[in-house]
Image: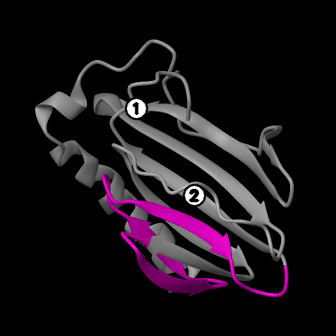
Amino acid sequence: MNRRDFTALLPAFLSAAALLPEAAQAQAPKSYPPLKSGPYPPGPEYVQQPGRNSHRFFAGMLPDNIRSECHITTIEPGTPHEPVNKHLHSEIWFVAEGTVSLNINGVEHTLNKGDVGLCAAGDLHYVTNIGKTRASYFVITVGPPEPSAGKA
């Protein structure tokens, strides 16, 4: 899948969030700002772990109380994987460089530069660099706000 194909899929994925159960579409916490159309440059580093860093582009609420966030993460070879996690939102990964393993519910999936991975809400997952060079990937989240308001 190339970037053009990935970009073409985004509107469909974002609109699918409107099908979430009513409870998930509850009023968003005030700590999530409304997102507006336009460019979003990368912000300051917000993950500071040895061998791993992330820069957020945006985090906030789309129309219809749909939370979205986008960041890029870079992982050096040999860095331990992030904690196994699950969320109320779904996540899309686009690998910009290197090779990563996307573990979803205990199943390993190898993603190379240019590949896209999807983790549906509620699935246990983590990403790790399995290559010999630096890996980086973009993450886009879509779904209801997490109960810990303001943490993206």
Q: Quadrant of the image for the C terminus? A: top right
The disc at residue 112 is none
Q: Which residues are magenta?
A: 104-133
Residue at 22%, 33% (x, y): give it: 24
Give the answer, above or below, for where 98 lies relative to 86: below
**Residue 139 got which mark?**
2
Q: Is residue 120 magenta?
A: yes
Q: Which residue is mark 1?
A: 146
- Colour treatment of the image: one colour
Q: Is 81 left or right of 19, judged from the image as shown?
A: right
Please give the name of the residue rendered at 70% of the width and 74% of the height, measured from the top-left corner.
Answer: 96
Residue 39 visible? The answer is no
Q: Residues within 10 Å of mark 1 (few under 14, many from 20)?
A: some
Q: Nearer the viewer, residue 58 or 93?
A: 93
Q: Position of residue 80 (x, y in %)?
A: 72, 66
Residue 111 vertical position relative to residue 140 in the rendered view, above or below: below
Q: Within 10 Å of the Cα at label 2, are there few (<14), some (14-19), or many (20+) other Cα atoms? A: many
Can you tell which quarter of the image residue 40 is in? top right
Disc 2, SS: strand
Q: CA distance from mark 2 to mark 1?
A: 16 Å
